Image (cartoon, grey):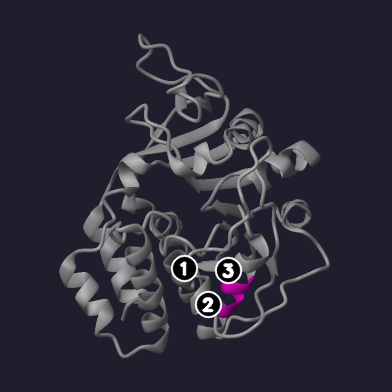
């Protein structure tokens, strides 16, 4: 079976799930990574970290493109990622194209490319504005939003306008929301197994985990890795078809996902291929990640 050609759009460097997701992608024969783009805040630093990670897997040939650091409207400080201190060497990401143009160029060249959106949707939003006819046919799978809850989620709230553009223009979009990905937390036993691994790449990942837990106090939850696992094995998640958008106003609702389905409808009638996750097979997911990344 021909590998799935993907572009990974990532905000790697803060939470560790992006790094695990990229590792899973490059270690899986079912996937061919055409390139990796960075998004949100210091995207050059994120690109350096991506290249550093790729070196562990002898995948330095995969091009890495610097994306948009600032959201379309709001202006956060462009701090370096919290894990930046683990960087081993200096790297120079690709300069021939920026992330947005790389997405458009690749989408125009290949009919079967899938964009895996692991961070805020700024790069994607700009790509849709610049080349809507090219981008609308692209398959997109992203981590973001909450579909079973009305609370704003990080990837969407960081750039709601970009997320709204994507939901307005895209025709083939699948989102795995926080209400499902939050269950991908590593257990104490799994964390101990990772810590005790003799694999240098796993130790590199674990060092990032330690920094993340120390700086945030949060447990290790592999949100973004579920995207890659879903491409490898669609049975890891249960999807439901639906039409949805992003709310841009409201003191409590800015950045939330809004379903555009009438409550009386039992089947969503939409011409778009829009899906969202409603459940996951946690053991199936854990088997994929633990056997491929943390072995």
Question: Closer to the camera, 279 or 13?
Answer: 13
SS for callout 3? strand
* Above or below for 108 versus 288: above
Residue 241 position by quadrant: top left
The x, y position of residue 228, in whole percent, is: 45, 59
The x, y position of residue 163, in whole percent, is: 58, 36
Question: Closer to the camera, 121 or 3?
Answer: 121
User: According to the image, label 2 marks what residue?
Assistant: 53
Please provide the residue range marked out in magenta. Answer: 48-53
Question: Is residue 50 one of those drawn in magenta?
Answer: yes
Overall secondary structure of the magenta section: helix
User: According to the image, label 3 marks what residue?
Assistant: 32
* Above or below for 254 versus 94: above
* Circle nearer the N terminus (2, 1): 1
- Determine the CA span between mark 2 and mark 1: 7 Å
Q: Is residue 107 left or right of residue 119?
A: right
* Circle nearer the N terminus (1, 3): 1
SS for callout 1? helix
Q: What residue occupies the far top of the structure in this picture?
A: 264
Q: What residue occupies the far left of the structure in this picture?
A: 189
Front tag of 1 and 3: 1
The reply to whether the C-beta atoms of the residues labelled 3 and 2 are less than 8 Å apart is no
The reply to whether the C-beta atoms of the residues labelled 2 and 1 are less than 8 Å apart is yes
User: According to the image, label 1 marks what residue?
Assistant: 19
Question: Is residue 225 one of those drawn in magenta?
Answer: no
* Circle nearer the N terminus (3, 2): 3
Mark 1 crowd level (few <14, some 14–19, many ≥20, 10 Å Cα): many
- Determine the CA span between mark 3 and mark 2: 17 Å
């Amino acid at each position: 079976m021909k590998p799935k050609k993907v572009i990974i759009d990532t905000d790697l460097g803060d939470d560790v799930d992006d790094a695990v997701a990229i590792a899973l992608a490059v270690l899986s024969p079912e996937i061919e990574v055409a390139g990796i783009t960075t998004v949100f805040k210091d995207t050059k630093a994120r690109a350096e970290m991506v290249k550093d990670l790729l070196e562990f897997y002898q995948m330095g040939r995969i091009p890495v493109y610097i994306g948009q650091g600032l959201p379309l409207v709001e202006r956060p400080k462009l701090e370096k990622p919290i894990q930046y201190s683990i960087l081993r060497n200096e790297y120079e990401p690709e300069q021939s194209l920026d992330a947005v143009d790389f997405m458009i160029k690749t989408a125009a060249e290949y009919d079967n490319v899938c964009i895996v959106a692991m961070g805020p949707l700024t790069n994607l939003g700009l790509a849709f504005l610049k080349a809507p006819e090219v981008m609308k046919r692209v398959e997109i799978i992203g981590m973001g939003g909450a579909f079973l809850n009305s609370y704003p989620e990080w990837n969407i709230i960081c750039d709601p306008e970009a997320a709204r553009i994507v939901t307005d223009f895209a025709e083939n979009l699948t989102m795995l929301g926080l209400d499902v990905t939050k269950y991908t937390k590593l257990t104490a036993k799994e964390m101990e197994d990772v810590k005790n691994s003799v694999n240098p790449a796993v130790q590199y990942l674990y060092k990032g985990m330690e920094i993340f837990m120390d700086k945030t106090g949060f447990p290790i939850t592999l949100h973004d890795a579920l995207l890659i696992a879903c491409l490898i094995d669609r049975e890891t998640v249960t999807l439901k078809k639906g039409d949805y958008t992003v709310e841009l106003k409201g003191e409590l609702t800015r950045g939330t996902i809004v379903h555009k389905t009438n409550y009386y409808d039992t089947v969503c009638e939409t011409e778009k291929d829009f899906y969202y996750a409603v459940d996951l097979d946690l053991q199936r997911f854990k088997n994929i990640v633990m056997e491929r990344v943390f072995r």
